[in-house]
Amino acid sequence: MELATLEAEDFRIRCSMVGKIMSDPKGNNLLPQGAISYLQDWFYEQSTGDQIFKGNKYTKKGWEVEDEAIDDYAKVTGYAGLVKNEQFYGNDFTEGTPDVLVGDDLVTDIKAPWELRTFEKYAKHIPTEKHPAPNANYFWQLQAYMLVTGRERAELAYVLRNTPKQLLSYGDRWVDYEKEIPLEKRVKIFVVPRSNSHIARIENRVELCRDYLRETIIPENS
């Protein structure tokens, strides 16, 4: 997309990034600072073609063990024949590729923590109506996935897999989690109900982001 043709209406936020714009703004501001920073990065990437975040060892582990993590999730839940979803979904507000689609009504996002300590940090979360997931960003991500897929149910699955040795840095200790910890203790699932009120907030926030792009960021860079 060329800079000359970049317009506010082009803004669609990735489902995985929705949490970046959804915190509460301070004072009389319509957008939180995190959303403004995200929009500045978005404009830079769209106008230059340069991707700011290119991944790190934590995201690389998730990519490398994703298929095996999906298999573990399938074994624990009893869902048969699960494979990584490759279909891209989008609407006027958000877009993305969910990890797993189960049946006709369930969408699941798979997370592969770097180590046991990280896994346990999230696994010990006690779900409540206000906080069904241990991470607010993932809550928003799943609401966005339900929005674009039209599904009514979502699950967030943390799956502890061995870290590929080639990703280890100096000082990292490799542990054979798959041998030392039973499968059912390496998978923790959180149910995230669909919330149409939160989905409406996503749509509203995207519109506010477009307003900010139109009124501030695009004119400043013209």
Image: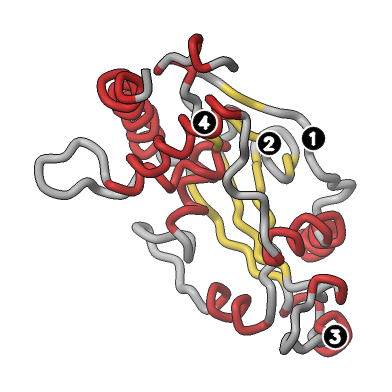
Marks 4 and 1 close (CB-CB < 8 Å) = no
Residue indicated by mark 3: 176
* Viewer-side label of 4, 3: 3
Q: How far apart are labels 2 and 3 at the CA level? A: 30 Å
Q: Residue at x 62, y 36 (%)?
A: 50
Label number found at residue 97: 2
Quadrant where the image shows the N terminus: top right
Marks 3 and 1 close (CB-CB < 8 Å) = no
Q: Position of residue 167 (x, y in %)?
A: 80, 71
Is 14 displayed left or right of 64 in the figure?
left
Which amino acid does the dot numbered 1 rest on?
Glu
First reached walking from the N terminus: tag 2 or tag 3? 2
Q: Residue at x 85, y 55 (%)?
A: 67
Residue indicated by mark 1: 86
- Quadrant assignment, res 185: bottom right
First reached walking from the N terminus: tag 3 or tag 1? 1
| Element class at badge 3 | loop
Tell me the crowding category of disc 1: few under 14, some 14 to 19, or many 20 or more residues within 10 angstroms, Cα based.
Answer: few
Q: Quick one: 49 or 28, which is closer to the camera?
A: 49
Marks 2 and 1 close (CB-CB < 8 Å) = yes
Q: Position of residue 197 (x, y in %)?
A: 34, 36
Tell me the crowding category of disc 2: few under 14, some 14 to 19, or many 20 or more residues within 10 angstroms, Cα based.
Answer: some
Tell me the crowding category of disc 3: few under 14, some 14 to 19, or many 20 or more residues within 10 angstroms, Cα based.
Answer: few
Q: How far apart are labels 4 and 3 at the CA level? A: 38 Å
